[in-house]
Amino acid sequence: MAADKPTRPGTELHALLGLSPSAPQLAAFLSDLESSTSHPAPPPPEVKPYSDIVYLNYRHIGLSLSFAPSAGYRPSPTSSLDDIRREGDAGRLKCTGVDLYNHDAAARPPPRDKGKAPRQRAEDRWERFPAYPVLLPSPSSSASSSSPANPAPFPLDPTTTGSSLLSHLGEPTRKGGGSSSTPALGIWTEWTPLGVMVEWASSGLGAWDKGGESTWRCVSVFEPGGGGAKGGA
């Protein structure tokens, strides 16, 4: 009898890309996550429809899913969750991005007044994602014979720092942010071939100098080779 194949514990967010809002696979994924939380009756997602994108924000599990319309469909500003799922059934919406928000206090934007602790409105709060680690894809192996054919994914958790991710993924394809005029906006790095973009809890003066020891605020995944776009917070 053949032995079972070993499995890697963790969550692969890229598996959600291409699914519709009404896909059974998505419903099963969300149900599994929500069963691990303390919510007796998980709330429905916050719906943010725009003409070219629809965001479903699952704040109680730290996730935002973005869906792109097709086949001539233009979401209305008043579109409901039922409307969105109906269009998904018709094949006119598919998931093009997933944003994971870090609930950890160290990842929150700094307060405008340094003498006050950062505060969040209840409706803006992202709760803990219940299925860490999140497995981020690794770069393809190089020509070096010492590189594994299928490199292990990177296990991201709320305490992951810039230096630890950089040491695994290598130099980013694109990066930006860190302006001293917008201290609430952190620096960001994108690995376009992997479909991964990360905003870090480092901003303002000297943001890049501090980035290596900073934790992440938001991880966005998208189709490898595409371009990252921040979600519906």
Image (spheres, helix red, strand yellow):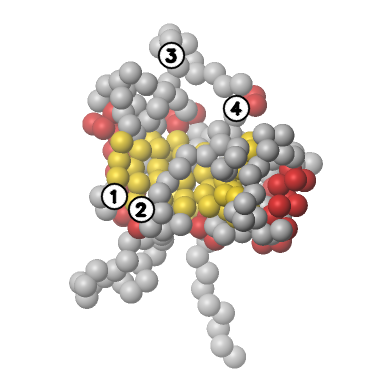
The numbered mark, 4 or 3, whose residue comes first in the sequence reads: 3
Q: Is residue 170 left or right of residue 62?
A: left
Numbered mark located on residue 124 in the image: 4
Q: How far apart in space, not on screen, are marks 2 and 3 (Cα)? A: 32 Å
Q: Is residue 22 left or right of residue 156?
A: right
Q: Nearer the viewer, residue 148 or 76?
A: 76
- Secondary element type, mark 1: loop
Residue to which mark 1 is pinned:
173
For badge 1, the amino acid type reads: Thr
For residue 168, what is the image quadrant?
A: bottom left
Which residue does the image show at 72% across and 34% down from the upper left?
Answer: 78
Which residue does the image show at 50% across and 33% down from the upper left?
Answer: 104
Residue to which mark 3 is pinned:
112
Q: Is residue 135 left or right of residue 4?
A: left
For badge 2, the amino acid type reads: Thr
- Residue farthest along the bottom direction in this orientation: 1
Which residue does the image show at 56% across and 88% down from the upper left?
Answer: 2
Residue 156 spot, x, y in % from top left: 44, 49
The numbered mark, 2 or 3, whose residue comes first in the sequence reads: 3
The quarter of the image holding the C terminus is top right
Identify whether 26 is placed above or below 124.
below
The numbered mark, 2 or 4, whose residue comes first in the sequence reads: 4
Please state which of the two labelled residues, at mark 2 or mark 4, is closer to the viewer.
2
Numbered mark located on residue 182 in the image: none
Residue to which mark 2 is pinned:
192
For badge 3, the amino acid type reads: Arg
- Residue farthest along the left direction in this orientation: 144
Residue 225 spot, x, y in % from top left: 38, 57
Residue 146 spot, x, y in % from top left: 23, 72
Q: How far apart in space, not on screen, are marks 4 and 1 (Cα)? A: 30 Å
Q: Residues within 10 Å of mark 2 (few under 14, many from 20)?
A: some
